[in-house]
Image (tube, helix red, strand yellow):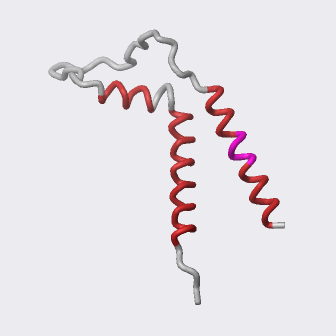
């Protein structure tokens, strides 16, 4: 019975993952304007790190959350595989 539950949970997870990939906006090739203006005396960062962070937490936040779930599941799976059997 437990095996069927795991199969159902896995299929639900894969369906959510597929839906997130298919519904994500992977970029249209157009530059999106920044939604903030720097205050007086401040300047925009010269590297692209700020732009990457801005895009991840605005346009791609759903894909970012799905990636966090996948990595958490991988971590839990690795701990499960690595644990020692009790004698």
Q: Is residue 38 left or right of residue 51?
A: left
Across and down, in percent, residue 63 comes to 55, 34
Name of the residue lying farthest toward the top: 30
Magenta span contains residue 16: no
Across and down, in percent, residue 46 comes to 21, 22
Q: How many marks?
A: 0
What is the chief secondary structure element of the magenta stretch? helix
In the picture, the quarter occupied by the N terminus is bottom right
Name of the residue lying farthest toward the right: 1
Q: Which contiguous range is marked in magenta?
A: 11-15
The structure residue drawn at horizontal position 53% and vertical position 54%, both measured from the top left corner, is 72
Using the image, determine if residue 48 lies above or below residue 14.
Answer: above
Across and down, in percent, residue 57 comes to 45, 32
Q: Nearer the viewer, residue 39 or 16?
A: 16
The structure residue drawn at horizontal position 37% and vertical position 17%, both measured from the top left corner, is 34
Q: Is residue 65 left or right of residue 8?
A: left
The structure residue drawn at horizontal position 52% and vertical position 66%, both measured from the top left corner, is 79
Q: Nearer the viewer, residue 76 or 44?
A: 76
Q: Is residue 42 left or right of residue 17?
A: left
Q: Is residue 87 left or right of residue 57?
A: right
Magenta span contains residue 14: yes
Q: Nearer the viewer, residue 57 or 75?
A: 75
Name of the residue lying farthest toward the bottom: 87
In the picture, the quarter occupied by the C terminus is bottom right
Q: Name which quarter of the figure residue 14 lies in.
A: top right
């Amino acid at each position: 019975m437990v095996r069927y539950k795991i199969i159902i949970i896995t299929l639900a997870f894969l369906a959510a993952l597929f839906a997130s990939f298919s519904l994500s906006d992977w970029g249209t090739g157009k530059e999106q304007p920044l939604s903030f203006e720097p205050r007086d005396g401040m300047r925009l960062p010269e590297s692209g790190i700020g732009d990457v962070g801005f895009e991840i937490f605005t346009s791609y936040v759903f894909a970012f959350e799905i990636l966090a779930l996948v990595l958490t599941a991988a971590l839990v799976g690795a701990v499960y595989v690595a644990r020692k059997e009790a004698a």
